[in-house]
């Protein structure tokens, strides 16, 4: 055997031994709260590709649409039991387990821009709160994303809080209804399928429904031509979390890469959906029949101040909810986002 042959065989052997370390080391199954074909789900699939890229192929994530393995509000238990490895979901689905989940998921009126929520999660104590809430249930919070601020559908001009008084509007039960009622509106609970007809027949004047591009595509702005954009009320926290034990079994560099992947994905999702909203806004304005209203910072702060009282009422329902309330209001006060 020549020296060249010996060297070649040694090199091949070394590469063969090193190959498993470069191949897929971890395989996980996540379930989304969005259906296949939904724009959010399509973007989430991009996140799984980003994870693979940022971990040099060592982590593979199979993402399943809503209800593939368990119902949308059962993923937390399924992850703890090992039926799923993780999920991408709206945190508010677990408010029945602890009202703290509902408060951190969508503190109505808190955010005027997704970056405010991202800053709260990264540097204002939000991520630590999520892990305090989820670790006891066997989950690890990896990071947060959001589809962005929902627009507000209205058939009458709304320039600020005073215009909400007596407004007949559709809003989901719970904190959203409570805040709008406190602001003087008359919220009612209607399924999404009845919003268009109810607006068209003047059963309601306005609706908390979805983001601007969705509202525009469904013709809501045509029959209720005074939308508020960007919205002032609702922006859901969507978590990416996984099984705590499996997370703890990951090398530190993989954990870091997964956290960074969520941060990058969140910015991509927000930018993509904002671009679609802005295109829909431009289309609406160009038509000449829709007037888009954008509330001032002062009016947004007024609405937030009304909301805080409702957050406080929710905070009394559990120790965790109180901790979320104190951390959230402390952050908003520090940033000058609460009226004194």
Image (cartoon, helix red, strand yellow):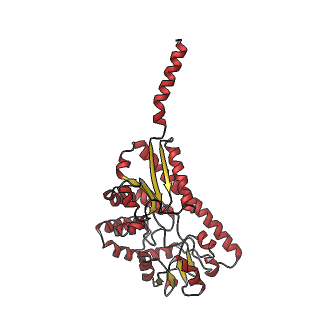
Residue at the location (68% across, 79% down)?
Answer: 289
Residue 318 position by quadrant: bottom left
Residue at the extreme front: 69
Residue found 50% across the figure and 76% down from its top: 299
Residue closest to the far left: 319
Q: Quadrant of residue 239?
A: bottom left
Relative to 21, does residue 214 appear above or below in the rendering?
below
Please indicate whether residue 280 sits to the left or right of residue 118 in the image. right
Q: Position of residue 254 (x, y in %)?
A: 43, 44
Q: Is residue 66 above or below residue 9?
A: below
Expressed as whole percent of the image width and height from the top left, the position of residue 22 reads 48, 36
Q: Nearer the viewer, residue 10 or 160?
A: 10
**Res. 156 in view:** no
**Res. 217 in view:** yes
Q: Position of residue 6 (x, y in %)?
A: 51, 16
Q: Residue at the right extreme?
A: 287
Quadrant in the picture for the C terminus: bottom left
- Residue 178's x, y, as percent? 41, 79
Q: How many marks?
A: 0
């Amino acid at each position: 055997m020549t020296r060249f042959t010996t060297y070649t065989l040694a090199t091949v052997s070394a590469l063969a031994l090193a190959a498993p370390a470069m191949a897929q080391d971890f395989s996980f199954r996540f379930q989304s709260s969005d259906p296949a074909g939904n724009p959010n789900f399509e973007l989430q699939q991009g996140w799984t590709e980003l994870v693979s890229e940022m971990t040099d192929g060592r982590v593979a994530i199979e993402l399943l649409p809503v209800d593939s393995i368990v119902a949308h509000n059962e993923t937390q238990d399924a992850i703890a039991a090992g039926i799923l490895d993780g999920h991408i979901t709206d945190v508010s689905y677990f408010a029945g387990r602890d009202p703290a989940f509902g408060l951190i998921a969508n503190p109505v009126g808190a955010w005027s821009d997704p970056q405010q929520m991202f800053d709260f999660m990264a540097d204002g104590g939000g991520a630590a709160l999520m892990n305090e809430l989820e670790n006891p249930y066997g989950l690890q919070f990896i990071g947060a994303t959001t589809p962005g601020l929902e627009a507000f559908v209205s058939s009458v001009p709304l320039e600020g809080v005073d215009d909400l008084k007596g407004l007949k509007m559709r809003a989901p039960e719970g904190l959203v209804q409570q805040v709008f009622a406190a602001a003087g509106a008359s919220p009612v609970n209607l399924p999404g399928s009845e919003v268009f007809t109810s607006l068209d027949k003047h059963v309601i004047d306005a609706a908390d429904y979805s983001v601007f591009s969705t509202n525009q595509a469904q013709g809501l702005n045509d029959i209720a031509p005074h939308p508020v954009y960007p919205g002032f009320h609702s922006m859901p926290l969507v978590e990416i979390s996984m099984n705590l034990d499996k997370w703890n079994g990951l090398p530190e560099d993989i954990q870091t890469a997964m956290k960074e992947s969520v941060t990058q994905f969140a910015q991509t999702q927000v930018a993509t959906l904002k671009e679609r909203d802005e295109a829909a806004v431009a289309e609406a304005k160009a038509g000449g029949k829709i007037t888009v209203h954008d509330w001032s910072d002062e009016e947004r702060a007024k609405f937030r101040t009304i909301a805080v009282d409702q957050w406080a009422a929710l905070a009394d329902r559990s120790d965790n909810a109180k901790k979320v309330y104190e951390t959230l209001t402390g952050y908003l006060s520090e940033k000058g986002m609460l009226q004194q």
